[in-house]
Amino acid sequence: MEPAERIAVDLAVPAMNGLRRGRTTGSCATAAVKAALLLLLRGERHDSVDIDLPDGVHYLAVPIQRVERQGAQARAEVLKDGGDDPDNTHGATIFAQVRRNDVGQVRFFAGRGVGTATAPGLRVAVGEPAINPVPRQMMRAVVAELLGEGAGIDLTIGCEEGEVIARKTFNPRLGIVGGISILGTSGIVEPMSLATWIASVEVYVRVALAGGQPKVAYLPGKIGREFARDALGLPEKRTVQIANFLGDALDFTERALREEGRMLDELWLAGHPGKLAKVLDGHWDTHSSKSTMAMGGVARVAGQWGYGPHMVRQIDEANTVEAAMDILKQEPGAGAFWREVERRIGALAHARAPSVRKLEVRLFDLAGNLLGAGQ
């Protein structure tokens, strides 16, 4: 059967939200590899090359900024264009240097400005250049396209000023030293997409779990950070800022633990009920555009807990969860009530991550005070 004709991705065509899409660092590096190989192997200089995207259906035409022969190797440069959703690498020059080797393998090296992994839990092994699996797959496919399987090629991927750019990223915290990471799962940067943000949460989850760590904490925001550090004794690397992506973070946790074939002893969720209590109504993406406010779920628990109709209505009609918390402060047994809210949130979260032995929730007000007193 003849393969289906590939479909071009035109970045000039706006995304559905009217904004311009871009190309990932992985796509830029892949295009640079292809342009350099075409010069090295065939003596051809191209000002644009087509690269296949990971979906196996689409391809992308990528402009080449510069390509040159350097003795036994060739080098090409591509300008990173993040579209209307630029990140720290927007406008950076990604380059590839290629040369043959006699080991019959495609080998990856970190050039100037691309980092090296020094800590476990990342998508690449310790000591490897910070080039993620999908970009590696894309580059291997280019080598196979031009040379066939089993070709021996060394690929050195770098980024001009990458050391400086990396200081603006989380790479130093993740144990990636010396520069940026070469990233991308689709090859395309979708403008204003949450995909990159969610993908970064998965990276932080895997780093937190790395090395068989028995205990980690996930925080929707800064509230709960002192609790994780002081009460739980967790270093920063074992805590994850999950933002609105509680459901995704739990799914990533379950997936990583299953891949490792192990259980996690303790997972703590610590933060404000304005975020965490939304799961009482089944909202696992807690962004305001994706979920209702948390007062309804808290009010329902209050009614089941035994508070009277007037109190339940006050909680339900409060403008904010903080206002509902002020109402409950006047009631005896408020600490026990918030412990029940924590228990229910924890039970729902635990069902989503069954490879965790113990999942605990701690709720705090905006001042960082523990709501379930006496714990």
Image (cartoon, helix red, strand yellow):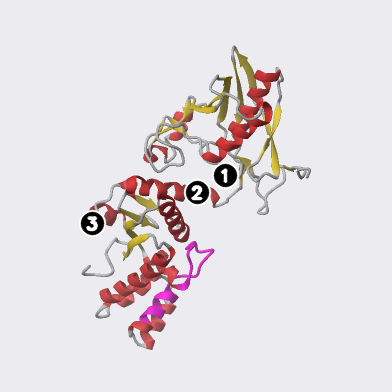
Q: Tell me if mark 3 has few (under 14), some (14-19) or many (20+) residues whose alpha carbon lies within 10 angstroms of its own.
A: few
Q: Secondary structure at mark 3?
A: helix
Residue bearing the label numbered 1: 185
Counting from the top left corner in percent of width and height, residue 24 is at 58, 39
- Tell me whether the residue at label 2 lies in contact with that at label 1, contact meaning CB atoms closer than 8 angstroms: yes
Q: Secondary structure at mark 2?
A: helix
Residue bearing the label numbered 3: 231
Left or right for 192, reference 357: right
Residue bearing the label numbered 2: 199
Q: Tell me if mark 1 has few (under 14), some (14-19) or many (20+) residues whose alpha carbon lies within 10 angstroms of its own.
A: some
Which comes before the other along the chain, label 2 or label 3?
Answer: 2
Question: Quick one: quadrant of the N terminus?
Answer: top right
Q: Secondary structure at mark 1?
A: loop
Counting from the top left corner in percent of width and height, residue 245 is at 46, 58
Give whichever of 221, 345 is nearer the camera.
345
Q: For marks 3 and 1, give the CA distance.
A: 37 Å
Quadrant location of residue 265?
Answer: bottom left
Residue at 70% across / 45% down in the picture? 57
Give whichever of 130, 271 is nearer the camera.
130
Q: Identity of the amino acid at label 1?
A: Thr
- Tell me whether the residue at label 2 lies in contact with that at label 3, contact meaning CB atoms closer than 8 angstroms: no
Left or right for 271, reference 153: left
Counting from the top left corner in percent of width and height, residue 313 is at 41, 83
Q: Is there any visible trace of residue 170 in the rendered image? A: yes
Q: Identity of the amino acid at label 2?
A: Ala
Residue lying farthest bottom? 309
Q: For marks 2 and 3, give the CA distance.
A: 29 Å
Quadrant location of residue 75?
Answer: top right
